Image (spheres, rainbow, N blue to C red):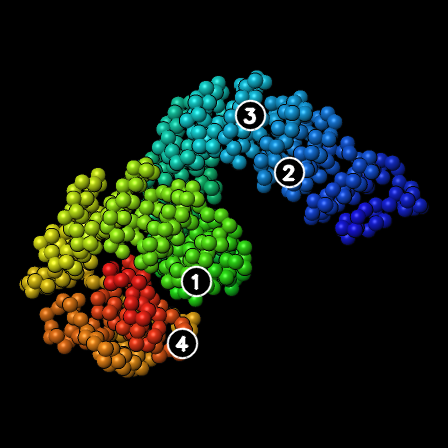
Amino acid sequence: MATTLNMAMPVSMWSPTQTKTTKTVAQPREFQSQKLNILLKAITSSTTLRQLKQVHTQILRSNLERSHSLLIRLLLSSAAFSSEYAVSLFSQIPNPPTHFSNQLLRDFSRGPTPYNALLLYYTLRTCVPLALDNFSFPPLLKAVSRASALNQGLEIHGFASKLGFDADPFIQTGLIGMYAACGRVVDARLLFDKMSHRDVVAWNIMFDGYCQNGCYDCVLELYEVMKSSGVEPDGVIFCTVLSACGHAGNLSYGKAIHELIRKRDMVLDSHLQRALINMYANCGAMDLARKLYDEFSTKHLVVSTAMLSGYAKLGMVKEARMIFDEMIEKDLVCWSAMISGYAESDQPHEALKLFDEMQLRRIVPDQITMLSVISACSHVGVLEKAKWVHAYVDKNGFRRALSVNNALIDMYAKCGSLDRAREVFENMPRKNVISWSSMINAFAMHGDAHSAINLFHRMKEEHVTPNGVTFIGVLYACSHAGLVEEGQNFFSSMIDEHGISPKLEHYGCMIDLYCRANLLRKAIEVIETMPFAPNVIIWGSLMSACQVHGEVELGEFAAKRLLEIEPDHDGALVVLSNIYAKERRWDDVGLIRKLMSHRGISKERACSRIEMNNEVHEFMMADKYHEKSDQIYEKLGEVVSELKLIGYTPSTSGILVDIEEEEKKELVLWHSEKLALCYGLISGRKESSCIRIVKNLRICEDCHTFMKLVSKVYQIEIVVRDRTRFHHCKGGVCSCRDYW
């Protein structure tokens, strides 16, 4: 035996000579059994294909090549390293019995690489076609389903028909599952309808096929057919039907199924409990889900997780956290659900905090968890945390996942590092349309429209077909750079060259493009001719543009249309108030404020965040709660004095309240981003470092000028991420070229 195998077992275990010299001479059958067990252990302990080949040599030397159990174990183990070697082993077996080939097909179809079953099938067809019988086809069809290998499935279907096996109910059921798994659900239903006998398994597979393909209404229609078929649905079918009700949002049908389960006095195992909770949660009926949940005497882990997920998906994170904290046992799924709930409910700090706690408890995250963590990091916009998450991804092997790489591009872009986003993109071994779209969107949000457009052309040169999301990124880039003609051309090419029907988001980009360029008439034309009703975002774009360009009547019209859709929209009421204030219509301003007060509507408060020394500091307007507040305001006064020497005068055009001019100047100087900037200046940053600020609202005109001038006087780079885009200020110039 070679050295690698001898490391696993002593040479004496393999030596026939030593066995002969022992005092107790083993019987031939006992001796063969001993060798068989030794070889089985050797196969199990082998960690490379080379070691398995060495074991194969020992099998041949020991005359055990006819041992089916040994050969099956060897074949299955070698398939993990080389399917070609495994199949070649099989082809060397003279006249393999059918049950042997069928067992291999079953094991291959259940293994991590189901395509091995198809390789074995083609070997059998070529070399020993008699080794295939009606029991060969169900595992083959299972392998096709798992590999989504439709062409091979069609060929296998034809061969089964040629052999006369297509009437076998087990093969028919396998064919239904295969067609459904490959997206041919109509073909699956045709086969299902032709079956002479449909047992509960066949019904289950057809129901599941519809669910896999998102045909939830078809599930409910099929259930109505089943009720008159004489076949009683089991718990698995009820779970599938309840899932369809949830996805279709059909609460009344789901309630009816629940009532039927009660009438049949079925035992609610954990699967049915979870299905019912998920159905109510997906239909938005969390009160009914909670009532049912409270009825369960014991709370199974999967049921509690379903309840937690239901709350989290609806943004009810307090209720979700209560369930989470009540759970005695917690698995990775519930941790991920809670982290995802925080990330998607605009509470990214809580998501990251919970992830840190998860690490302390040594719970290993999976890809789903990491995607939520990366998303939370994107929302926070803190680069140092983003770098840490990226390092964690690399260290723990998540970088191989395409979806994780795509998320990293978005994370770095939203954390203000376009260079790192581009580095991730360029180093990806494999890219899909999402990768390209993410990078185009990254350029767009950073105001680098020309790079976004160039990347779009490079994408087409590499024969990657753009989708609707790609065009949103390109149109967004054109909109924020004032590239009207280019935007019009992209919009036309989307329809004419790529056959993509514009959605509301694409029309919204075009309207925003025209609004920013002060082509309000064209914007109105798009609104009037598009096949969709304008939404809040579209009316908001027009309304904001009218405020900027002084179109009072049209702005008032847009604001009122927006408020018809969303009466309590604070932004619309504030803009409408500002429009009136610009016209000095103070009575109308008073009416708006009175209305807001009566309805309990308040303007969203401006907030700016800055990360320094691995800590995030938040500032509100005129904030004096920070521990270094005195030093911050002292620095602010110093900075203002420096800027005034080069001609800076605070602009109060954005302060639309009826107060004295000097008071307005004070207010504008106390904006949250100015306070965050001054904290950055006094915090012992490195000379070459960049100050990064994240603001929840759009930066005002005065603060934008302030950032540019500070970058020139203090020779630093300042990156401000506001509600819609990034501003990179360096040497007195902003990346937006003052077009934002």
- Look at label 2 and name its amino acid: Ser
Residue on which disc 2 sits: 83
Q: Is residue 416 left or right of residue 592?
A: right
Tell whether label 2 touches label 3 (CB within 8 Å). no
> Mark number for residue 444?
none
Mark 2 vs mark 4: in front = 4
Mark 3 vs mark 4: in front = 4
Q: Is residue 665 left or right of residue 226?
A: left
Which sits earlier in the primary sequence, circle 3 or circle 4? 3
Residue on which disc 3 sits: 156
> Mark number for residue 687?
4
Examine the rendering and report whether any part of residue 533 can be seen.
yes
Disc 2 to disc 4, how far (Cα)? 58 Å
Name the residue: 92% across, 46% down: 22
State whether residue 518 is above or below residue 691: above
Residue on which disc 1 sits: 386
